[in-house]
Image (cartoon, rainbow, N blue to C red):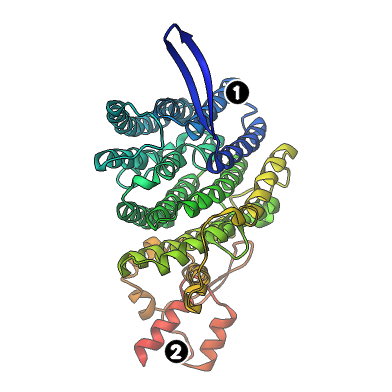
Amino acid sequence: MILNLKLFQFEFFSIQMSFILDFYGMIFSVSVLIILFSILLFSTDYMIFEINKSFFFKLMLMFVLSMLLLINSSNMFWLLAGWDALGLFSFLLVIFYQSETSLSSGFITVITNRVGDAFLLCLMTMTSMTMIWSMSMEMNNLMSILLVLAAITKSAQIPFSSWLPRAMAAPTPVSALVHSSTLVTAGIFLLIRFYSSLNTDILFTLGSITCLISSINAIVEKDVKKIIALSTLSQLGVMMMSLGLNKPEIAFFHLIMHAFLKAMIFMCMGELIKKNNNNQDIRLYGNLFNNNSIISMYLMGGLMSLMGIPFMSGFFSKDAILEFLSLSNTNLFMMVMGWSSVLMTTFYSMVLFLELNKTSVLCEIDYKHNLITLLSMTLLFLFSLVSGALLSPFMKENFYFCMKLLKVLPLLLVFSGIILSLLTNLYSFSSYISYSLGFMNTISTWSNINQSKTLVLTNVIEMGWMEFPIISVKMFYFYLKTLNLSVSFLTIILTILILY
């Protein structure tokens, strides 16, 4: 359905706005407005001491209006207007905290987005030659390339990914809005609109590479907001992979699921940052479940949905993507990259939660939470739980029967990622490999340290070989009783393999 609104008319010249009212546009617009309402509610407490709070709220509203214009525009002219306004207001929001870091991050963000604007402007110039401004037009190869280049700059795909983590210099409510349902998803939504004219092989390759690289970086990153930003980047790669599999409906489905849960995760982390004296280094966090049980519950719910735990909202879209990937004609290498992306998502999500819950004396106990803050989080938490079950019946894709192994593959990948994160306990894994000579130091010299909950060193076993034999029933009993999930279990296995 097309809705035309005449703005201005002078003799034979008139200016009018054209809106397209379809399933994609309506669902996306409602989702953006729900997320905006929750974030503005959250910001009333989070930004309470800011001098320019009213200006901040105006910028947020203008930013969302630009996004709604982009979503519902039916011609290229107004789409470009919304696209350009998104880049401008995102720059103003990123530099809201006036500092050298935020200014540098803001310029990187706006310059990268201007590159995408240039590609879209070139596309608009080519469409003007045909005198066809409708978004339902057919595109040639050059126009399709320009469209893809414009989309991957806005959605931070390789090689335009660097601006997204840098944009974390913005206030947390901005990050929750920009990195959940607006700026970064604008490129994906644009590709869904023009999907019939695209080369899907390029999209799958870009998405899989982006997802894998961002997931690896999320594992070793120590800034909590950048970890979540890299998580967003990996999920954008999953959406791009879905487009590459000729499944735009599933890509849109995953976009909506991700928007709700990622906005909630950002809000939870923003509250934790505020309680932790604005520190964003994950090494300074701990005792989350004991100190902030409600936030811990919401955060774990969001991470479980992100991992694709069965019957959470993220499970419905991610399971569908993996099934279609397994049944596609994609080569084995690209298929393995797609599977690895799900494994790595579970991996860094569990690492983040384990880091936030490790024993620490640096975090103060604070049970007090503003009622408005909890209300805003609760709203998004409920949507992140039920949106998958509510929207899955409206997806047009047919689900096929497949082998049992392929059916349970998503679950195997999720649980493999959980087990791997528990075994390695990645607090120091990124540097452990480098200083332990690939576990050789651990194998040749054996030690174990027990710590009480108050971090008082209570028992130190001397360095060197254990007093009882390495391979014995007593040794296995000892390590099962005092299992250290970081290195001990892995070292036992390696020792047995070497000795036998």
Specify the quadrant that holds the C terminus: bottom left
Q: Residue furthest left?
A: 142
Specify the quadrant that holds the N terminus: top right
Determine the residue positioned at 33% across, 76% down: 440
- For label 1, the crowd category at 10 Å Cα-Cα, with few meaning under 14, some 14 to 19 and many 20 or more, is some
Q: Is residue 171 visible?
A: yes
Q: Amino acid at mark 1?
A: Lys
Read off the residue under disc 2.
470
The residue lying toward the viewer, choosing from 257 and 425, is: 257
Of callouts 1 and 2, the N-terminal one? 1
Would residue 148 appear left or right of 135 to someone viewing this image? left
Q: CA distance from mark 1 to mark 2?
A: 64 Å
Could you say which disc has been placed on residue 27 in the image?
Answer: none
Give percent across and percent down for residue 359.
59, 60
Determine the residue positioned at 48% across, 78% down: 403
Foreground mark, 1 or 2?
1
Q: Amino acid at mark 2?
A: Ile
The residue lying toward the viewer, choosing from 28 and 282, is: 28
Relative to 20, say whether 13 is above or below.
Answer: above
The residue lying toward the viewer, choosing from 188 and 411, is: 188
Label 2, secondary structure: give it. loop
Would residue 105 appear left or right of 455 to someone viewing this image? left
Read off the residue under disc 1.
53
Give percent across and percent down for residue 472.
49, 93
Determine the residue positioned at 44% across, 64% down: 324
Give percent across and percent down for residue 181.
52, 41
Residue 110, quarter of picture: top left
Q: How many marks?
A: 2
Label 1, secondary structure: give it. helix
